Amino acid sequence: MSKQSGYTFSLTPHLILRKIWLNPGISRIDLSRELGLNKSTITTSIGELERVGIIRTAEAGSAGPKGGRKPLALEIDPAFGFILGLELRTDQYVAAGVSVQGDILFTAVAPIDWSDKDLPAMIRYILAELDTSIRKVGIPLLGIGLGLPGTIDPDRGIIYYSGPLEIDEPLHFDAISGDLAGVPIKIENDGNCCAWGELVFRKEECPENFLFIMGEFRPLAVRREKVRIPAIGLGLVLGRRIQYGAHHTSGEFQSVFHSPKYLNSFSMADDLFKKLEEDPGLLKKMFRELAQNMALLVNVLNLEALILGGSFEEYQEIIEPILMEEIDRNWPIPHPASRRILFSRLRESAVAFGAAAMFIEKLFALPDSAAKAAAPREDLLQAMFEARRRSQAR
């Protein structure tokens, strides 16, 4: 246990904070019963959390069957702050201001030019462009979730490789991010960001085991020819946990039919992609190849659903029947399996929204044990309290 920014961190406040976040409107009585904590512990912790402004007492709940005093309902204080979700592409950025309960407060999309900027410079440039939108929200910016293409370790804050961003050597992003925004920045692979969005904010619809397919049309790399090709990012979720693989390469896509003579991830010649988005025949050919690859994964892993987001949502009527046909064709057992094809409904904002969701989950996640309560999540909370204090002082 340690004390920072006037607040004592231990496992108990984490338990209480997460329970309130997951169950807005919960009463102190229910908190005590569900967490197995006595009334005085609940009262003390709630008082501390209210004092730093992260929770508040909401409208009173319903009285019991015998009448009497209504229990006081607890919730995360909407005025505590919001998260900025940011996706960096090879040709543009997508931003989404997101409340801790998943409400989208604003979105922004704009082109970017990487010719004279590295990653830190680009982030500073985008934040300057978004300054007015951020201020208009009217509550403090607590942190930034950043979605990027590439092989990324989100826990250690390392970008190992990103072909689209032309990062060939490991970049320790956490070591350089401290002075970029004045708030914590957490990074994640773009496909995994999309999966986070489903896990964190679409709980009622979210399957236990699914594959998120993030599909976008964008230039291959930041300083290459600006022909838009399909970029595929995959987020694999098993048992409601994102799968990263031994070297954080899980989710990197290349078709089993791919030819090394082409730059794109499919078997189609690069020149064809110049007219792909306007040619229904070429689109169907590309979606068919994607479906053949995905069918193997869905059936081998016995996944409940495929969820699609990004630019591919625009082609739902084309891609959905092709996916179902290839999944059924690949299924080796005579008894049919129940599969679902879902769409994120966020279109171009899927990665940015998911990046914010990832950050929020890290904020309210439980440490693995009481011994880990002070690492590194405590630093995240402390940094946000400090950012909130500075924002209010302006």
Image (cartoon, helix red, strand yellow):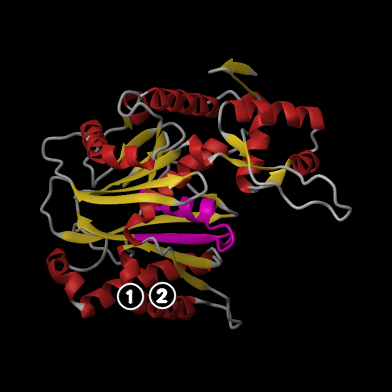
On the question of residue 250 being in view, the answer is no
Question: Where 100 sits versus 194, above or below?
Answer: above
Question: What residue do we see at 16% from left, 35% from top?
Answer: 117
Q: Which residue is mark 2?
A: 323
Find residue 316 and report its horizontal and vertical position in percent.
36, 74
Identified at 57% across, 26% down, the residue is 52
Q: Quadrant of the C terminus?
A: top left
Q: Earlier in the sequence, mark 2 or mark 1?
A: 1
Q: Nearer the viewer, residue 255 or 148?
A: 148
122 or 331: nearer the viewer: 122
Query: Which residues are the magenta region?
Result: 190-214
Q: Which residue is mark 1?
A: 288
Check if residue 201 falls in the magenta segment: yes
Q: Which quadrant of the view contains residue 262?
A: bottom left
Q: Is 106 located above or below residue 43 in the figure?
A: below
- The amino acid type of the residue labelled 2 equals Leu
| Image quarter (top left, top right, bottom left or bottom right) of the N terminus | top right
